[in-house]
Image (cartoon, coloured by chain):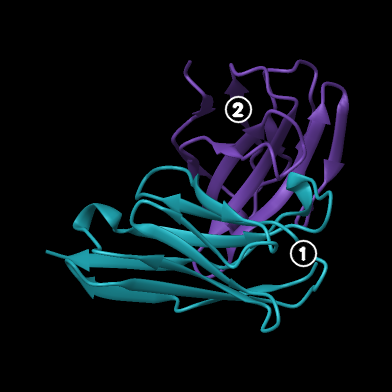
Chain colours: A purple, B cyan
Amino acid sequence: NAGVTQTPKFQVLKTGQSMTLQCAQDMNHEYMSWYRQDPGMGLRLIHYSVGAGITDQGEVPNGYNVSRSTTEDFPLRLLSAAPSQTSVYFCASSLTAWAQNSPLHFGNGTRLTVT
Amino acid sequence: QQQVKQSPQSLIVQKGGISIINCAYENTAFDYFPWYQQFPGKGPALLIAIRPDVSEKKEGRFTISFNKSAKQFSLHIMDSQPGDSATYFCAASPPGGSNYKLTFGKGTLLTVNP
């Protein structure tokens, strides 16, 4: 099992550009989510999905879109990149959405810089 | 979203020493408290978790202590090793809580010197 795979590992964008961060998992997990990690801010939830075709907003959704057309994939789209979106982005999945019996499995992150 | 306050922000410990990271929470309804460990360049991974019906849980050199009345829980790393150098996140979840309701602390960067 590859677990949770994120691509690319690094990306530099200019302000106003758009891009898609890819996330794929091969564990047949129902739940998938995106976090951003900024120094001193911890992990903040951007969007999440409890199953294919179902998505919802997290704590910091503005400027990001998601879709979940398959169980395996959960791409994160930046519509018009801003310097404030410079961050490390993590995709995480779990077997079910229930925290107590389904720990989160994180990918290794995408480091995004917006100039 | 309810807060989980984690301290210290960074911690330096000598090899063989005890590392202690503390978390305090506000919502008395929280009933699941996991700790995640993140090595440089990697994503976080579940380290150990506790529910409030026990006051302590131990897995190897890692122990969670839980104080329900004080609304605090802490991670103790005994005989700390350089390989334990990582960022540690505490988290809390409400009853029946989903992973999207998991509230994370802001993290503690632990450095264990050889």
Front disc: 2 or 1: 1
Q: Amino acid at mark 1?
A: Phe
Quadrant of the rendered structure where residue A92 is? top right
Q: Are marks 2 and 1 on the same chain?
A: no
Q: Residue at x 35, y 51 (%)?
A: B60
Rendered-image quadrant of the N terminus of chain B: bottom right
Q: Secondary structure at mark 1?
A: loop
Q: Residue at x 77, y 64 (%)?
A: B30
Residue A50, horizontal then vertical, whole percent: 82, 32
User: Distance between the Cα atoms at labels 2 and 1?
Assistant: 30 Å
Residue A46, horizontal then vertical, whole percent: 72, 49
Q: Residue furthest front?
A: B54
Q: Residue at x 37, y 45 (%)?
A: B41
Q: Amino acid at mark 2?
A: Cys
Task: Tell me the residue that label 2 is attached to.
Answer: A23
Q: In this rendering, does residue A86 appear at all?
A: no
Task: Tell me the residue that label 1 is attached to.
Answer: B30
Q: Secondary structure at mark 2?
A: strand
Q: Mark 1 Cα within 10 Å, few/some/many (few <14, many 20+)?
A: many
Q: Nearer the viewer, residue A37 or A106?
A: A106
Q: Residue furthest left?
A: B114
Q: Nearer the viewer, residue A77 or B103?
A: B103
Drawn side of residue B38 relative to residue A41, left or right: left
Q: Mark 2 Cα within 10 Å, few/some/many (few <14, many 20+)?
A: many
